[in-house]
Image (tube, coloured by chain):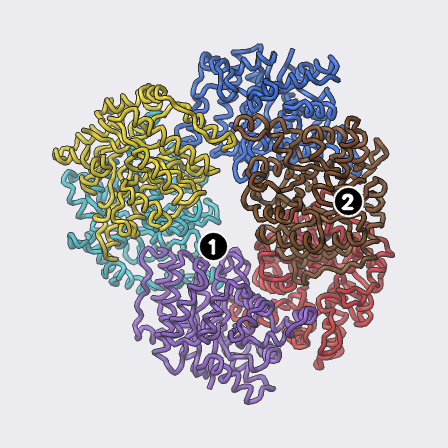
Chain colours: A blue, B yellow, C cyan, D purple, E red, F brown
Amino acid sequence: MIIDAHGHVTAPDSLYVWKSGLLSHRGSHGVRPPSVSDDQLREAWHAPNPSFGHVSHMDHLDEAGIDIQLISPRPYQMMHSEQPARIVTAFTEAVNDVIHQSVQLFPDRLRGIAGLPQTPDTDVAAWTKELRRTVTELGFVGALLNPDPYEGTRTPPALGDRYWYPLYEALCELDVPAVIHSAGCKPPTREPYSLHFIQEETVAVWSLLSSSVLTDFPDLKIVVSHGGGAIPYQVGRFQPDVVRSGGVPYIDRLRRLWFDTCLYTQDAIELLIRTVGVDRCLFGTEKPGTGSQINPATGGWFDDIHTLVDGIEWLSDGDRQALYEKNAVSLFRI
Amino acid sequence: MIIDAHGHVTAPDSLYVWKSGLLSHRGSHGVRPPSVSDDQLREAWHAPNPSFGHVSHMDHLDEAGIDIQLISPRPYQMMHSEQPARIVTAFTEAVNDVIHQSVQLFPDRLRGIAGLPQTPDTDVAAWTKELRRTVTELGFVGALLNPDPYEGTRTPPALGDRYWYPLYEALCELDVPAVIHSAGCKPPTREPYSLHFIQEETVAVWSLLSSSVLTDFPDLKIVVSHGGGAIPYQVGRFQPDVVRSGGVPYIDRLRRLWFDTCLYTQDAIELLIRTVGVDRCLFGTEKPGTGSQINPATGGWFDDIHTLVDGIEWLSDGDRQALYEKNAVSLFRI
Amino acid sequence: MIIDAHGHVTAPDSLYVWKSGLLSHRGSHGVRPPSVSDDQLREAWHAPNPSFGHVSHMDHLDEAGIDIQLISPRPYQMMHSEQPARIVTAFTEAVNDVIHQSVQLFPDRLRGIAGLPQTPDTDVAAWTKELRRTVTELGFVGALLNPDPYEGTRTPPALGDRYWYPLYEALCELDVPAVIHSAGCKPPTREPYSLHFIQEETVAVWSLLSSSVLTDFPDLKIVVSHGGGAIPYQVGRFQPDVVRSGGVPYIDRLRRLWFDTCLYTQDAIELLIRTVGVDRCLFGTEKPGTGSQINPATGGWFDDIHTLVDGIEWLSDGDRQALYEKNAVSLFRI
Amino acid sequence: MIIDAHGHVTAPDSLYVWKSGLLSHRGSHGVRPPSVSDDQLREAWHAPNPSFGHVSHMDHLDEAGIDIQLISPRPYQMMHSEQPARIVTAFTEAVNDVIHQSVQLFPDRLRGIAGLPQTPDTDVAAWTKELRRTVTELGFVGALLNPDPYEGTRTPPALGDRYWYPLYEALCELDVPAVIHSAGCKPPTREPYSLHFIQEETVAVWSLLSSSVLTDFPDLKIVVSHGGGAIPYQVGRFQPDVVRSGGVPYIDRLRRLWFDTCLYTQDAIELLIRTVGVDRCLFGTEKPGTGSQINPATGGWFDDIHTLVDGIEWLSDGDRQALYEKNAVSLFRI
Amino acid sequence: MIIDAHGHVTAPDSLYVWKSGLLSHRGSHGVRPPSVSDDQLREAWHAPNPSFGHVSHMDHLDEAGIDIQLISPRPYQMMHSEQPARIVTAFTEAVNDVIHQSVQLFPDRLRGIAGLPQTPDTDVAAWTKELRRTVTELGFVGALLNPDPYEGTRTPPALGDRYWYPLYEALCELDVPAVIHSAGCKPPTREPYSLHFIQEETVAVWSLLSSSVLTDFPDLKIVVSHGGGAIPYQVGRFQPDVVRSGGVPYIDRLRRLWFDTCLYTQDAIELLIRTVGVDRCLFGTEKPGTGSQINPATGGWFDDIHTLVDGIEWLSDGDRQALYEKNAVSLFRI
Amino acid sequence: MIIDAHGHVTAPDSLYVWKSGLLSHRGSHGVRPPSVSDDQLREAWHAPNPSFGHVSHMDHLDEAGIDIQLISPRPYQMMHSEQPARIVTAFTEAVNDVIHQSVQLFPDRLRGIAGLPQTPDTDVAAWTKELRRTVTELGFVGALLNPDPYEGTRTPPALGDRYWYPLYEALCELDVPAVIHSAGCKPPTREPYSLHFIQEETVAVWSLLSSSVLTDFPDLKIVVSHGGGAIPYQVGRFQPDVVRSGGVPYIDRLRRLWFDTCLYTQDAIELLIRTVGVDRCLFGTEKPGTGSQINPATGGWFDDIHTLVDGIEWLSDGDRQALYEKNAVSLFRI
């Protein structure tokens, strides 16, 4: 069985028409989301989509042999930094509801990962309310954690800061993982959102491993998207300092986290697995998404991550089973 | 014949899905708009729409006996203050193109009023390029002028300031009116966009009449939406100062502008006409829009402005013809 | 009997010389106000004043047949946004004392409306101290409420915000009305103070009627100056939304407030009375003030509001009595 | 003959009532100053004034034996930092006109020193227009120079900066001295205006002597008020650095400037004269002003600077004549 | 015996190399100071130093006949405004430790005055921890107090503000004096740090004497460096206001403080002593430092303050003993 | 022969003592650097250094068999964001002079790479003056380019912005490569300088490859430090977008740049070489520096990059020669 730990929801146009309205009327038309019928939603999952390379989400999963996908909100659409906070909260809840409705429609294929209403104008404790609702009432198996609710417009507290502790406490109490994944990225930063993902993941890992978070929360489970940003590639850079100052070796710290394989080149995936160990890796594709484009060099999709994994000769059968299924089953208690 | 000088475009969902994306990827997916087929667009104009009271745009026009409507972008969706500027410019051009395509589809029913890419990060002269394109190439008969491109987040230069002169020059050169109409309104202001319209119109009229704009540009044609904000009601307040300082009486200054009847109560429309004269008034409904809700007291639509106008007993036939048709024909050279 | 609900204090020059000094030394010469003798004050009320059209305040009242005028501080002089707070507080108290002294001098002609030391650097609860002093110790019958203590330099919390609740609580406890009236207006706004009055009244009414203030404080009495800004003229605009969202019809909400007739044109006063009902209107002139200029068209004063009211043919005798006297007597418990 | 180089204008109340209004209406009532009749002005100069210790300005001069006083605007009233700029400019011009009118009234007793409209929103070159008017048309003999037009709210460019060069050029061209004297001082600074004078003079002298201004403008004549702030007392502190870096000794640099004796203790005046030399000192009293209070220890006025000077035993007759008369005659070309 | 109340520590280069690093890595290399051996430190005190005029610190003391010097951190190096706070705290503690080690090395010659970690990002109470450590554990006899921890980049609360009370409480409890002395001064201010010292001392004295600090803390002992900034020279300016408002005469207030003689000209030192009285003066040289340059006019050091004091003929032997020794012994309980 | 393209200068303590002073007096002691004798400098290069693992710089080179090292300023010490600009400029020039002096001392072992005075308060064109001086007069072979002169305190223009063009023009004209390497990183960012290097390199590569810089400057030579940040690891992520939008494939764009091997793990170096090709790689160690710590797992230095390269079995002899020598010789024209 193949479990894809990194997928984002597909929704009918009405969700985004509503979002466009929220950003225009700023809540003065109310914040009630459009109702989405099961038929509309099923249609959305089965309809060929130009931005998915003219293939439907479900066909992508089928083609790639993905049995179960963990689906979360499309991060770049989450608009965490917008004002007033209530439009962000309403949109987040609506997206989580669409995720839940999707999981109900395709109970064998999908599991839910929640978005959190991480608006800078509300406090961290307030965000945990939606975490509790999605996990307790809707059966979600994890939640996205955006290290930058300001979306590039200010510097947020680092993940090692006590600012984030109410969220860590709730995650531990509910025993679900957080998946590090930033959202949008607005001017004046120099990075498009897609690069911001990478930069934020790099900072997030660095900050967590340099702080006492993982000691203070020994049961906290953190997954880092996109293979951990720059860290596995640059890991050698951070080892000497840790030797100088004493304490747990850097590579052992790194192995307290999990990483998905959303990397698009075999060399990168190999480096990831060699660096953090197969037991800390989760198969993840972000499919359909950024990589849903035919690679002219291969004729396949750029995001056919499974073909890259399959191409790694030195993985044992047990390694592959861990990567494709067992690690995710265990971590997300699927 | 009834000409409605105040209408806003109806467009397929794809336009707003695209807008939602622009605000999320900030241009990193490119800024090419979705193509809209004539069939999709015709369908949009004929489809019952929940936010229009479950009636189509065209049915609204037919019901109200409106022969020709001047259509401009939906102002609250224009997102002038967003960054980077190129997403605003692209969206504005796309909306103008949908207006043009609509006019082509319904040449007997519609005329175009352009939106301008009034982003605070570009200069006023740059906005006139789109004005020229829409008037010269697309045959538009006027353009919206937003006095607050910051959408409530900063104080813009007042309309009496020389900052705006490049736009006034282009309007005079092309001999088309500008229609004062603000766009969105974002926190921290205390006003929803709909009230911001009124406030901005009030400031706009005050500023124009207190400055030398109308002297410097004797041929400039300005229409103020929604009956001129607060000014006709409060006009007595501004008369004594003008007597003190000398110069053209306030009421004569006011009559240098045009006003539409988008006011929703007969008392208000009567006050407007009495105050500025029937020759400075244009029939306008903003239909379908804010007022497209059944009035429980009458069983008709709140925005059935024609029933309000028809209820004014003291208007002569000539007055009605001027109001419904001749003033607009003359001003917009329809 | 004619009661004028909207008058502002007349004071000797020494008050303003002292104010000019406060703004120059910022309190370093102390904040003790000049003493004003009864003779000086009586002289001020009886002296012809160039800014009043070369007529004295008392002569204006006599000419217009005003028996009793409610007098408050001249709002545009109140300098709420200045620093340090103690010069604002001292000036406010001094002006209230001059009002009190005037009422003592002319007990049959005047009643006091307090100014509040609404400096942004002190909290709302602190302002109620002066409210209590003026009502309890000096016998004042109401107080001005400035919705914008920043005087145009920042966006204040809207009147629907809980920020203002300590003031509402004190008003209810003392059972006196608040009169909405902003103060000065400083750059960078685009509005002179006189237009700022109108804009702030518009926002104030909108905010109060869109919030739960009038439900949370069922006994709160609010008077809106200058005929309610733009709202009675634009009221049709706000009705459909309320129908959509349910709840008390907009016009019924509006009738929870009171409005004065300080409008200067008969058309506007008629619209006001038709819209909110004669029982919610108070005769008010702002005399002597902005309108104390001879109208070349009539030969009378622009602010001869009584001639405008007298010109409304459809008012009954009972209506006139309510408007001129009974509403004010009842509301202010005169 | 005694020439007092440091006096400030006395004006009728109407000037300050007008100023209070300008700060309230911000120019929306126009910026025309009140006309002051010769009688009113003569009365102001002869009337006992509580803030002058209940003695008139002219009586103060007579009592102290001052034959001629150089009068400039009262600096703390000049409101340079206020907005919009046109109220500052209008007030400055009006004060200069009152100074001129005073000099016309008392041609044997007074000479004019101009205020400049040093608003931060206008450029330095614009200020020179009023300098030219007052010197060329009104016969003024110098001008105040405020090193801090922001009045404590921001850091201005130091006097050594090229920012100030257009003013230095005009001063040289007209061949009149500038008198360093700051104006008001607003929060958040920690200094009342009176201490701000001292601090600004200290910075001004330091900046001028550390820059190339006095080399670039060999004919520039600068008078520093209040005995030069802290510099003559602290002068030893600045000498070693100049020795280290080479160049003109500090004391020689200091002697390129002039200083007035407005110091109120004999010890301080002695230190000043010893430090800079009697040829660089001008008799100045700031009378009536801060020091116009009876000293309980002596029974005389604190600002009887002449008694302090007279008490210095080691001054020769020539020294006294230079100090009291000749230096001023020569510098100001009286 | 001569006690010099104003000296700053001399330290090996390694301290400043470490500081340079702290400002570069901002703590990411850790904040452990370099260890300084007694030999290195003794060498530093005995080595000729180019910035001391090529003479060693100890030789300077010997040459000037100084028996005991109170040494504090070099203020301009203290970097109070830098971030993060922990590099400031670490540096302050390290400097205090070097002072302590120096006093241990030269127990007959030196006494310690502490630096406090006055970073704007920590609260005042936190600073007292280091005060307690240095006084209680290291035997220091006082502490520097920087009135401007922002080092010129923002306006701090004035010393009369309750913000500072936790520090005053600790000083009283430990019964040690605070020595007013600012630290660095960064752009955009117009003052080099050396002038900033003077300006801050002026504001500090003004603020203390205008507030209730010395009444609220009758046992608080405050020494003002560099002869009190501008105050003794300008003291006459502040006397009239105090007479007007009543209360303790200004000169008596001034005599609640102590002042050092760090002034470099005999005239200034004479003025200081005459103004505040010999009993409030402490001999202080700041040697070696700013004044450690040969005066070409005398051939001696500018900072040979003892020669200036010796030159004052009117001092009695008792005066000299008080100034050189007894006042310091008593105040600092040496 | 082994050429190490990534080394930083070693300098005597006096350089950093001087820097510490510059940051304290901000230029008020002047900005003349300490003179460094050849003996002092030679000693610095040969002295065991605790921060280098108690080994000297030269011994590190010898141990690692490095024949020639390109040395640039230690980036984290460069303080680009400090004010005033002249202390940054002076420090940069002094460091370049020490580099030049070092190259003169060890002409067979060292080559110079310049630092540029990239202060945000000067314009880009001004920085090229020092580039010209170092290349033309001192024979340097390249220059560091810091993409973030604000050192984490603001967002700079991206490297694709025309802001940087004057620098690109000068680099092309002089025909020397720029080496991308940021400097310090100050609060409030969440990154220590060492991680900031990586983040800035990632943004730099992304920005250059998404802009027209490499087309506009076909001869521009850019080296990216530390293996290109995150890009080679994440390269797959950026390929699909380029396919969508057309144009040069991403990997071909990437191969327009050069990268050094400063990565500390063999896996990472292998991934780099496989991704960009051996012809775009330069051997670089940053030795001695961050990695100069004994790796407990191997007993060697972490920064023994040559042992990692030697461990890559699939490199040919030609590959090794290119990597160790030929690529650098050709690129830097050594």
User: Is B289 on the left or on the right of B319, as rendered?
Assistant: right
SS at circle 1: loop
Residue drawn at point x = 37 percent, y = 40 percent: B129
Label 2 – label 1 distance at C-alpha = 62 Å
Residue C206 percent coordinates (x, y): 35, 37
Residue D131 percent coordinates (x, y): 42, 70
> Could you classify mark 2 by the number of other residues whose Cα lies within 10 Å: few (under 14), some (14-19), or many (20 or more)?
many
The amino acid sitting under disc 1 is Gln
Q: What chain letter is assigned to the residue under label 1?
A: C
Residue drawn at point x = 35 percent, y = 55 percent: D25
**Image quarter (top left, top right, bottom left or bottom right) of the C terminus of chain B:** top left
**Image quadrant assignment for residue C57:** bottom left
Above or below, D191 against F218 in this view is below
The amino acid sitting under disc 2 is Gln
The reply to whether residue E250 is visible in this rendering is no
**Residue that mark 1 sits on:** C83
Q: Nearer the viewer, residue F244 or A73?
A: F244
> Could you classify mark 1 by the number of other residues whose Cα lies within 10 Å: few (under 14), some (14-19), or many (20 or more)?
some
Q: Nearer the viewer, mark 2 or mark 1?
A: 2
Task: Check if mark 2's residue and mark 1's residue have beta carbons within 8 Å.
Answer: no
**Residue that mark 2 sits on:** F69
SS at circle 2: strand
Above or below, A236 against E16 in this view is above
Give the residue at the far bottom of this rendering.
D317
Numbered circle sitting on residue D275: none
Q: What chain letter is assigned to the residue under label 2?
A: F
Residue drawn at point x = 69 percent, y = 31 percent: F277
Q: Nearer the viewer, residue E146 or B245?
A: B245
User: Is D309 on the left or on the right of B33, as rendered?
Assistant: right
Q: Are marks 2 and 1 on the same chain?
A: no
The reply to whether residue B284 is visible in this rendering is yes
